[in-house]
Amino acid sequence: MGEMKSMQMGVIGALFLSVASSVSIVICNKALMTNLGFPFATTLTSWHLIVTYCTLHVAYKLNFFENKPIDMRTVVLFGLLNGISIGLLNLSLGFNSIGFYQMTKLAIIPFTVLLETLFLNKKFSQKIKFSLFLLLVGVGIASITDLQLNFVGSVLSLLAIATTCVGQILTNTIQKRLNVTSTQLLYQSAPFQAAILFVSGPFVDKYLTRLNVFSFHYSPIVAGFITLSCLIAVSVNFSTFLVIGKTSPVTYQVLGHLKTCLVLAFGYTLLHDPFTPRNIAGILIAVLGMLLYSYFCSVASKSKQASSESTFLGKDRDTTPLLGQEKENHHEAKKLDKHSPV
């Protein structure tokens, strides 16, 4: 019982860390890109991953965690896949309208559900599907303003959805099947994610912004915000792997939309961004969907736990006496055979 409570507290802590760090980095990056004119998102992400790896390497050397070897091919492919998914999401934003990009992010949840159902035989109840539908409708109402389609942007969005879904499912699957922690997996895969983004980032950013990251004027305040963004990113990357490992890719995506609602609310209350009754209605619907999703998942988890406990107790109650009785009967039969006339 104490172990279960400790596990629940660990999940709550991971969710809180993910929300707090993600909202913080969005605020920091918004100031960096909007107010200070630093638009190089893909290159910045590669710096995030480099700092994350260096931080974890120091932690490893100080014995904060043990490194568990993982098959190199698995780590390389996993790292490259995650790096490519980040690059594709950034390209999708560059080639599509904001509204279509938001639709791309929303589509990750149903695609993840579909992939887990088809390839991992995972079951989602109708109630959970309804709560996810409510969440997607709410976030769509709150955040989608326009939907301008183009062929290249649509192809990039589909590739971004596919790579993101597969990457997040693998994050969960690798941790559970190979029995590695989120820290161990992030430590080994971060260099490969960073490498592909570090090499491709300047070209992607130059194509999207028509600016060169190497010729940008790095004032002390810009350098300060980049440093702060990289430090927060360590927490973001760690909590991402932690949440997916402890829960599921779908729960992580639900959490991501909670962050979207929080950022929208923050923008309105503190930054006085434009806000309409439609935004408020969308956020309320999305929050309702999240609450229902949390409730239905909690009920399903308790039901599954109770079922497994009753099965275990049933085995103890039924199997052991039967085995004991069988031995006793066998002993009695031997006694009868010994004393019975031939």
Image (cartoon, rainbow, N blue to C red):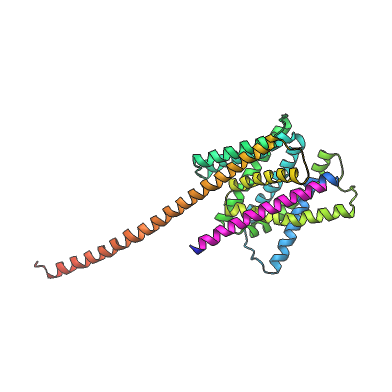
Q: Give the quarter of the figure containing the C terminus.
A: bottom left
Task: Choose top left, top right, bottom left or bottom right for residue 150.
Answer: top right
Q: Residue furthest left?
A: 341
Q: Residue at x 85, y 54 (%)?
A: 223
Residues drawn in magenta: 3-32
Q: Position of residue 37 (x, y in %)?
A: 86, 45
Q: Residue at x 39, y 56 (%)?
A: 310
> Where 221 sits versus 140, above or below?
below
> Where 55 sits versus 122, above or below?
below
> Where 273 sits versus 222, above or below?
above
Q: Is residue 145 magenta?
A: no
Task: Choose top left, top right, bottom left or bottom right for residue 224.
Answer: bottom right
Q: Residue at x 78, y 42 (%)?
A: 272
In the drawing, does residue 10 fall left or right of residue 127? Answer: right
In the drawing, does residue 143 fall left or right of residue 176? Answer: right
Q: Residue at x 12, y 70 (%)?
A: 339
